[in-house]
Image: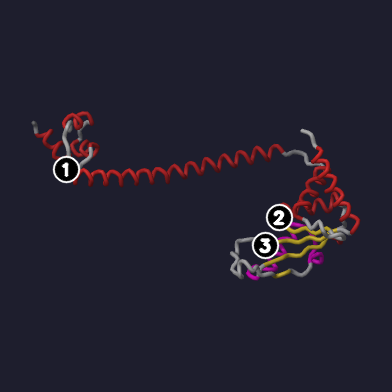
Amino acid sequence: MNKKGQRIISLRKQGKTYGEIEKILNLPKSTVGWWLRGVKMKKSIEKKTFKRCRNKWSRNISNYNKVYAKIRSEEAANDRENHQRRGYLEIKNIMLNDLKLIGNVLYWAEGNTKNRHLLRFANSKPEIIKVMMKFFREVCKIPEEKIKARVHLYPTMDQNKAINYWKKIVDLPKKNFHPSQIQISRASKNKRPKNTLPYGTLHLTAGNTEITCKVKGWIEGISEQVIKLRV
Protein backbone atom coordinates (compact mmCIF):
# COMPACT_ATOMS: atom_id res chain seq x y z
CA MET A 1 0.00 0.00 0.00
CA ASN A 2 1.45 3.37 -0.98
CA LYS A 3 1.57 6.47 1.19
CA LYS A 4 -1.44 8.00 -0.52
CA GLY A 5 -3.60 4.99 0.32
CA GLN A 6 -2.32 4.90 3.88
CA ARG A 7 -3.12 8.60 4.30
CA ILE A 8 -6.65 8.14 2.95
CA ILE A 9 -7.37 5.21 5.28
CA SER A 10 -5.82 7.01 8.25
CA LEU A 11 -8.00 10.08 7.74
CA ARG A 12 -11.07 7.90 7.38
CA LYS A 13 -10.36 6.09 10.63
CA GLN A 14 -9.98 9.49 12.32
CA GLY A 15 -13.58 10.17 11.41
CA LYS A 16 -13.17 12.26 8.26
CA THR A 17 -15.92 12.07 5.65
CA TYR A 18 -15.27 11.23 2.01
CA GLY A 19 -15.75 14.87 1.07
CA GLU A 20 -13.34 16.09 3.75
CA ILE A 21 -10.67 13.61 2.61
CA GLU A 22 -11.10 14.75 -1.00
CA LYS A 23 -10.49 18.36 0.02
CA ILE A 24 -7.57 17.63 2.39
CA LEU A 25 -5.65 15.51 -0.13
CA ASN A 26 -6.99 17.20 -3.25
CA LEU A 27 -8.05 13.89 -4.74
CA PRO A 28 -10.98 12.86 -6.94
CA LYS A 29 -13.92 11.12 -5.30
CA SER A 30 -13.30 7.91 -7.26
CA THR A 31 -9.78 7.56 -5.84
CA VAL A 32 -10.93 8.06 -2.27
CA GLY A 33 -13.77 5.58 -2.74
CA TRP A 34 -11.45 2.97 -4.23
CA TRP A 35 -9.06 3.05 -1.28
CA LEU A 36 -11.83 2.99 1.28
CA ARG A 37 -13.53 -0.13 -0.04
CA GLY A 38 -14.31 -2.31 2.97
CA VAL A 39 -12.61 0.07 5.41
CA LYS A 40 -14.59 0.37 8.64
CA MET A 41 -14.32 2.89 11.46
CA LYS A 42 -14.57 2.21 15.17
CA LYS A 43 -18.15 2.46 16.44
CA SER A 44 -17.29 5.42 18.71
CA ILE A 45 -15.71 7.37 15.86
CA GLU A 46 -18.52 6.36 13.51
CA LYS A 47 -21.10 7.79 15.94
CA LYS A 48 -19.16 11.05 16.30
CA THR A 49 -18.82 11.35 12.53
CA PHE A 50 -22.52 10.68 12.01
CA LYS A 51 -23.43 13.28 14.65
CA ARG A 52 -21.10 15.86 13.09
CA CYS A 53 -22.54 15.18 9.62
CA ARG A 54 -26.08 15.37 10.92
CA ASN A 55 -25.39 18.75 12.54
CA LYS A 56 -23.82 20.00 9.33
CA TRP A 57 -26.80 18.81 7.29
CA SER A 58 -29.12 20.49 9.76
CA ARG A 59 -27.26 23.80 9.44
CA ASN A 60 -27.21 23.55 5.66
CA ILE A 61 -30.93 22.82 5.52
CA SER A 62 -31.64 25.69 7.94
CA ASN A 63 -29.56 28.11 5.85
CA TYR A 64 -31.20 26.86 2.66
CA ASN A 65 -34.66 27.30 4.14
CA LYS A 66 -33.85 30.86 5.23
CA VAL A 67 -32.70 31.82 1.75
CA TYR A 68 -35.47 29.93 -0.01
CA ALA A 69 -38.11 31.29 2.39
CA LYS A 70 -37.10 34.82 1.43
CA ILE A 71 -37.29 33.94 -2.26
CA ARG A 72 -40.71 32.31 -1.81
CA SER A 73 -41.92 35.32 0.17
CA GLU A 74 -40.82 37.69 -2.59
CA GLU A 75 -42.41 35.50 -5.24
CA ALA A 76 -45.66 35.33 -3.27
CA ALA A 77 -45.63 39.12 -2.83
CA ASN A 78 -45.15 39.56 -6.59
CA ASP A 79 -47.99 37.13 -7.30
CA ARG A 80 -50.32 39.01 -4.94
CA GLU A 81 -49.36 42.32 -6.52
CA ASN A 82 -50.01 40.96 -10.02
CA HIS A 83 -53.41 39.52 -9.00
CA GLN A 84 -54.34 42.83 -7.39
CA ARG A 85 -53.23 44.77 -10.47
CA ARG A 86 -55.31 42.56 -12.77
CA GLY A 87 -58.31 43.02 -10.49
CA TYR A 88 -57.79 46.78 -10.50
CA LEU A 89 -57.74 46.88 -14.31
CA GLU A 90 -61.03 44.97 -14.51
CA ILE A 91 -62.93 47.84 -12.85
CA LYS A 92 -63.74 50.61 -15.31
CA ASN A 93 -66.25 53.43 -15.70
CA ILE A 94 -68.20 53.35 -12.42
CA MET A 95 -71.57 54.95 -13.17
CA LEU A 96 -74.04 56.61 -10.81
CA ASN A 97 -76.18 53.48 -10.60
CA ASP A 98 -73.08 51.47 -9.68
CA LEU A 99 -72.36 53.95 -6.89
CA LYS A 100 -75.95 53.53 -5.73
CA LEU A 101 -75.45 49.77 -5.38
CA ILE A 102 -72.02 50.13 -3.77
CA GLY A 103 -73.17 52.73 -1.25
CA ASN A 104 -76.24 50.75 -0.25
CA VAL A 105 -74.29 47.53 0.21
CA LEU A 106 -71.68 49.32 2.33
CA TYR A 107 -74.42 50.86 4.44
CA TRP A 108 -76.16 47.50 4.71
CA ALA A 109 -72.93 45.94 6.02
CA GLU A 110 -71.52 48.75 8.19
CA GLY A 111 -74.31 51.27 8.76
CA ASN A 112 -76.92 51.53 11.50
CA THR A 113 -79.96 50.15 9.68
CA LYS A 114 -82.11 50.29 12.85
CA ASN A 115 -82.19 54.09 13.01
CA ARG A 116 -85.39 55.47 11.49
CA HIS A 117 -84.55 59.16 11.17
CA LEU A 118 -80.87 59.44 10.19
CA LEU A 119 -78.29 57.53 8.23
CA ARG A 120 -75.49 56.53 10.62
CA PHE A 121 -72.24 55.11 9.34
CA ALA A 122 -68.84 54.56 10.98
CA ASN A 123 -65.53 53.29 9.70
CA SER A 124 -61.79 53.72 10.16
CA LYS A 125 -60.83 53.26 6.49
CA PRO A 126 -60.56 56.58 4.60
CA GLU A 127 -61.34 54.95 1.24
CA ILE A 128 -64.67 53.63 2.54
CA ILE A 129 -65.54 56.99 4.13
CA LYS A 130 -64.83 58.74 0.80
CA VAL A 131 -67.14 56.34 -1.04
CA MET A 132 -69.91 56.89 1.51
CA MET A 133 -69.56 60.66 1.28
CA LYS A 134 -69.94 60.43 -2.50
CA PHE A 135 -72.97 58.18 -2.00
CA PHE A 136 -74.55 60.70 0.40
CA ARG A 137 -73.86 63.62 -1.94
CA GLU A 138 -74.40 62.18 -5.42
CA VAL A 139 -76.99 59.45 -4.88
CA CYS A 140 -78.88 60.52 -1.76
CA LYS A 141 -78.59 64.24 -2.64
CA ILE A 142 -78.07 65.16 1.02
CA PRO A 143 -77.11 68.84 1.52
CA GLU A 144 -73.74 69.57 3.15
CA GLU A 145 -75.33 71.03 6.28
CA LYS A 146 -77.19 67.76 6.85
CA ILE A 147 -73.97 65.72 6.99
CA LYS A 148 -72.31 65.70 10.41
CA ALA A 149 -69.17 63.95 11.63
CA ARG A 150 -67.70 62.89 14.95
CA VAL A 151 -64.25 61.43 15.53
CA HIS A 152 -63.98 58.61 18.06
CA LEU A 153 -60.52 58.46 19.63
CA TYR A 154 -58.49 56.77 22.32
CA PRO A 155 -56.70 58.81 25.00
CA THR A 156 -53.23 58.32 23.45
CA MET A 157 -54.28 59.91 20.13
CA ASP A 158 -53.75 63.50 19.00
CA GLN A 159 -57.26 64.95 18.73
CA ASN A 160 -56.45 67.96 16.52
CA LYS A 161 -54.37 65.85 14.16
CA ALA A 162 -57.19 63.33 13.81
CA ILE A 163 -59.84 65.98 13.15
CA ASN A 164 -57.72 67.71 10.52
CA TYR A 165 -57.08 64.36 8.87
CA TRP A 166 -60.78 63.47 8.62
CA LYS A 167 -61.72 67.00 7.51
CA LYS A 168 -59.60 66.49 4.39
CA ILE A 169 -61.11 63.05 3.78
CA VAL A 170 -64.76 64.16 3.95
CA ASP A 171 -64.20 67.72 2.67
CA LEU A 172 -66.50 69.22 5.31
CA PRO A 173 -66.00 72.42 7.32
CA LYS A 174 -65.12 72.22 11.01
CA LYS A 175 -68.62 73.41 11.96
CA ASN A 176 -69.96 70.08 10.65
CA PHE A 177 -67.90 68.21 13.26
CA HIS A 178 -69.36 67.39 16.66
CA PRO A 179 -66.97 67.32 19.64
CA SER A 180 -64.76 64.25 19.51
CA GLN A 181 -65.54 61.29 21.70
CA ILE A 182 -62.70 59.86 23.76
CA GLN A 183 -63.16 56.25 24.70
CA ILE A 184 -61.14 53.66 26.59
CA SER A 185 -61.29 50.07 25.43
CA ARG A 186 -61.98 47.67 28.29
CA ALA A 187 -60.11 44.96 26.42
CA SER A 188 -56.93 46.99 25.89
CA LYS A 189 -57.03 48.63 29.36
CA ASN A 190 -55.63 51.86 27.93
CA LYS A 191 -52.65 49.98 26.41
CA ARG A 192 -53.75 50.10 22.78
CA PRO A 193 -50.73 50.47 20.43
CA LYS A 194 -50.40 53.96 18.95
CA ASN A 195 -50.15 52.63 15.41
CA THR A 196 -53.58 50.96 15.65
CA LEU A 197 -56.19 53.23 14.06
CA PRO A 198 -53.87 56.27 14.25
CA TYR A 199 -56.75 58.63 13.41
CA GLY A 200 -59.50 56.81 15.26
CA THR A 201 -62.88 56.07 13.71
CA LEU A 202 -65.12 58.55 11.91
CA HIS A 203 -68.85 58.43 12.63
CA LEU A 204 -71.15 60.07 10.10
CA THR A 205 -74.81 61.07 10.45
CA ALA A 206 -76.67 62.31 7.42
CA GLY A 207 -80.06 62.98 5.88
CA ASN A 208 -83.52 62.78 7.36
CA THR A 209 -86.38 60.32 7.82
CA GLU A 210 -87.29 60.34 4.12
CA ILE A 211 -83.86 59.42 2.76
CA THR A 212 -83.27 56.96 5.61
CA CYS A 213 -86.41 55.05 4.68
CA LYS A 214 -85.48 55.24 1.02
CA VAL A 215 -82.07 53.68 1.66
CA LYS A 216 -83.77 50.86 3.57
CA GLY A 217 -86.03 50.33 0.59
CA TRP A 218 -83.05 50.26 -1.79
CA ILE A 219 -81.37 47.65 0.40
CA GLU A 220 -84.49 45.49 0.44
CA GLY A 221 -84.71 45.77 -3.34
CA ILE A 222 -81.05 44.82 -3.80
CA SER A 223 -81.46 41.82 -1.50
CA GLU A 224 -84.55 40.60 -3.35
CA GLN A 225 -83.04 41.07 -6.81
CA VAL A 226 -79.81 39.28 -5.88
CA ILE A 227 -81.77 36.31 -4.53
CA LYS A 228 -83.69 36.14 -7.82
CA LEU A 229 -80.51 36.46 -9.88
CA ARG A 230 -79.93 33.71 -12.43
CA VAL A 231 -76.36 33.40 -13.70
**What count of labels does the image hold?**
3
Q: Which residue is mark 1?
A: 42
Q: Which amino acid does the dot numbered 3 rest on?
A: Tyr
Q: Tell me where residue 196 sits by quadrant.
A: bottom right
The amino acid beneath tag 1 is Lys
User: For mark 2, what is the residue?
Assistant: 126
- What residue is drawn where x is 65% and y is 37%? 86
Give the image's coloring scheme.
Answer: secondary structure
The amino acid pointed to by label 2 is Pro
Quarter of the figure with the C terminus: top right
User: Mark 2 or mark 3, which is nearer the start of the sequence?
Assistant: 2
Q: Give the image location of residue 16, x and y in percent.
A: 20, 41
Quarter occupied by residue 195: bottom right
Gap between marks 2 and 1 measured at Cα: 72 Å
Cβ atoms at labels 3 and 2 below 8 Å apart:
no
Q: Secondary structure at mark 1?
A: loop
Q: At 72% from the left edge and 57% from the top edge, which residue is drawn?
A: 123
Report which residue position mark 3 lands on: 199
Element assignment for label 2: helix
Q: Nearer the viewer, residue 29 or 23?
A: 29
Q: Can residue 45 be found in the magenta stretch?
A: no
Q: Residues within 10 Å of mark 3 (few under 14, many from 20)?
A: many
* Secondary structure of residue under mark 3: loop
Q: Residues within 10 Å of mark 1 (few under 14, many from 20)?
A: few
Q: Residue furthest right?
A: 210
Q: Nearer the viewer, mark 1 or mark 3?
A: 1
Q: What residue is at 16 percent from the left and 31 percent from the top?
A: 35
Q: CA distance from mark 3 to mark 2?
A: 10 Å
Q: Is residue 86 above or below residue 138?
A: above
Residues rendered magenta in the picture: 155-177
